[in-house]
Each structure stands twice: as C-alpha cells, then as structure tokens.
Image (tube, helix red, strand yellow):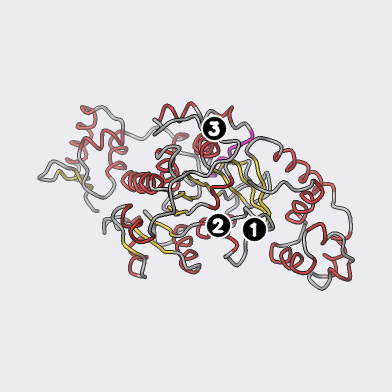
Amino acid sequence: MPVHLPIEELRAWIRLSLEPGLGPVQARQLLATAGLPHDVYDQSAAALSKAVPEAMARQLTHSPDARTVASIDATLAWLAQPRHHVLTLADPTYPASLLDTHDPPLLLYVNGNPALLSRPAIAIVGARSASPAGQDNARAFSRFLAGAGWCIVSGLAEGIDAAAHEGALQAGPEGGATVAVLGTGIDIVYPARNLQLAHQIAEHGALVSEFPLGTRAIKHQFPRRNRLVAGMARGVLVVEAARQSGSLITARLAGELGREVFAIPGSIHSPLSRGCHALIRQGAKLVESGQDIQDELGQPGGNTLPRDRDVDHGKSGRQSRDHNADHSRPDRQPHLRATKARAAAPSEHAPASVPARVLEALGHDPVHVDLLVTRTEIALPELQAALLKLELSDAVARLPDGRYQRRQP
C-alpha cells in the first residue's frame, strides 16, 4: 500500500507538481538540492536560485496562488474517495521500473489497485483503427499472458489498446490484471466510448496518470503517456501499426530502455501491417502466439494478483461479458468523466451499410463466414447476400476452401 503522508507533506508534493512555470526536470533538481517538497518550500530564494531561475526561486518562497490552492484541495477531495491513491517519487511503492527511466513523474495518480504498478508487466499496443482480426489477436494474446500472471499495460485508446485491456479482464481475478495509462487527468476518460471499459479497469485493475485532475486530451500528452507504458513493461508487443504511429513511438522508447520489442506479422497488403514489418526488420522479435513471448521473457514470477484492502475478493473465475457489465455501471465510479474525441465516434455517425460493415470485418486475411457472423452480428442470410454483392462487384473473392478475402485495388 502507498505511504500515508501527513497532510502538509502531501500538500507540498501536490503543489510542487502543479507549480506554475516549473517543469518536471526543474522540480527533480529542486528535490535533489533541497530534499523533500516541504523542505523546498522552507528554503530561501537565494538557496533555491542554485537550482532554478531567480524568478522561480522567489515564487517558491511565496504562498501558492488561488488557482493552485483550489487544485490542491480538489486533489485531496479526490484522494478521500475509495481506491484513489497518489504515489510520490519518495514512496517505496512507486514502481521501480519507472525509477529506471530518465524522467519519472513526480506523482502518479492511481484509481484502483496501486500494487499492480509493480507487477511484472507486458505492454500491448497498436492501431486505433485496428482491423477486427487485429483486435481478436490483441484479446487472445492479452488473455493468455494475463492468465499466466503478466499484468497487461496499455493506453486505453480505441482499437488494439481497448482489446488488450478486455482480454486481460477476461482472464479473471486470478490473472495478472491490467493497467491503463491515461493521457488525461485520472478523472477523465478519453475517448468517451471507453468509459465503461475504464470503470471495469478501475474495479478490477488500475487506471494511472501523471497529469493533474481535470487535464483534458491534448495531442502532445500522448507521447508522454507512451513513455510510461514502455517504462512499466518488461516487453512491448505491437499488434498492428501503420508506418507513422504512436505505437512505433512506444516500441522505440521501449528499445531505448532495454525492453524487449515483439511484433505480430500480418498481410503484406494491409497498411496496418507495415509498422510491425518495419519493426521486425529492425530487430523486433516476430511472434505468432503468447507462448512465444512467454518463452522469451520467462515466467512473471507467479500469477497471484496483488491485492489491497479495497479489492473485493469474492468474485469467482472467468467472467462473462454480462458479469463484467454488472460490475462496471457508471454509478460505481461516478468520479470518472468522459471526454469525447474531436472526430465523432462511429456510433455517432449514420449506420454503415451492411456491405460496408462486412468489408470492414473482413480485414485483409481470409475469413470464414462463421467468423464474419460473429464479428458483424449480422444474420447469416443477410450476410450471405452482402457477400454476394461484394463478390459481384469484385470487392471480395471466395476462395476454394469457402473463405472470403478482400481483393486488393
């Protein structure tokens, strides 16, 4: 469990992380020079100016402004709620894997079980606009690895990230669970369509963020999120990725930190395979199953889930989708808010035509009609009619074994 700090010491940590104009590098320099945050605020301007510019040193000797005080008070109110935690750099439960990176955050906000941040972890990342086959692969790899005791870390984005979190949750309460690293404040879910998934993760795993409460989604924050995903994991698996993508940034950061990088190969015709193929050419390990990763990294050190006093241990076994829904109602986590993506979610558009849905579900690899029924949830007669229409328009081809494949333009 995190250390319970005296209130004034906790206020000093929060203030230091919120100090206007003070970057994280300067904040760590102050800590290295003066000690803990409350020691920083006891220093004279002359002493502080050895670590920061003179104007900042004078600012630190004054009382915080009203906006900072309000943010500190809001954070303390958030911390008063069950399963809400803040880990500081000085906390013995701060994840050691992040201390090994060159810029560990001063604070980590955690909603859920903070012990999970120190579990042996594997990151699974990939394209937001993932194919159905890619999402199936992410779930399958995640479910297997979580079942073997690995904590699955990802970024709660649409597509591969969301599928990876879902697969880990499907491994049940005896698995390694999942941690979602947010690019927003801990109280905001982005994208909005993953709000229910975030409730499940907060209930059975952990949400974590380095950003202050109320921080909304801004583009430049997501590479910072990616460095935490890479830093927390022993290895990173890229499932699908275009040549220019955030997933490749995560993989590069992982390589720079000495983590293993894995990639799943795909169709040579799919643009979402090109990033993975590029990684493999650069030395990433090609994997075809979760066991390939397990063989490379070894056992995670047991599959016992770290528990804290807030976790309900009474749930049993593998959870069905309906069972998960029972424990992820929005009213169970009222402190989470959703931020909508700038581009409308698919559910906010007019429904796609049946042939278009079928074409999207096909992906770029041969697929049997039974799997298409599962992916699209379209009745078999209607699905077959759509496939015939696509076949006549040369959009898809029926293979000799009865499977269907998208034709390349």
> What secondary structure is the stretch in magenta mostly built from?
loop
Mark 3 / mark 2, whichever is N-terminal: 2
Q: What residue did someone put label 1 on? A: 105
Q: How far separated are the C-alphas under marks 3 and 1?
A: 29 Å
Q: Is residue 339 magenta?
A: yes
Marks 2/1 in contact by CB < 8 Å: the verdict is: yes
Residue farthest to the left? 400
User: In this picture, which residue range is highlighted in magenta?
Assistant: 335-342
Of residues 289 and 345, the one drawn nearer to the viewer in this rendering: 289
Q: What residue did someone put label 3 on? A: 312
Query: Which type of secondary structure does the marked residue at label 2 adopt?
Result: helix
Q: Nearer the viewer, mark 3 or mark 1?
A: 3
Looking at the image, residue 327 sits to the left or right of residue 41; the answer is: left
Q: Residues within 10 Å of mark 2 (few under 14, many from 20)?
A: many
Query: Which type of secondary structure does the marked residue at label 1 adopt?
Result: loop
Q: Going 84% across and 47% down the picture, which residue do you hit?
A: 66
Return the mark for residue 228. Answer: 2
Q: Percent position (x, y) of residue 269? A: 27, 57
Mark 3 / mark 1, whichever is N-terminal: 1
The amino acid type found where label 1 is placed reads Pro
Q: Going 82% across and 49% down the picture, which residue do you hit?
A: 8
Q: Going 67% across and 44% down the picture, which residue do you hit?
A: 214
Q: How far separated are the C-alphas under marks 2 and 1?
A: 9 Å
The amino acid type found where label 3 is placed reads Asp
Q: Residues within 10 Å of mark 3 (few under 14, many from 20)?
A: few
Q: Percent position (x, y) of residue 400? A: 9, 45
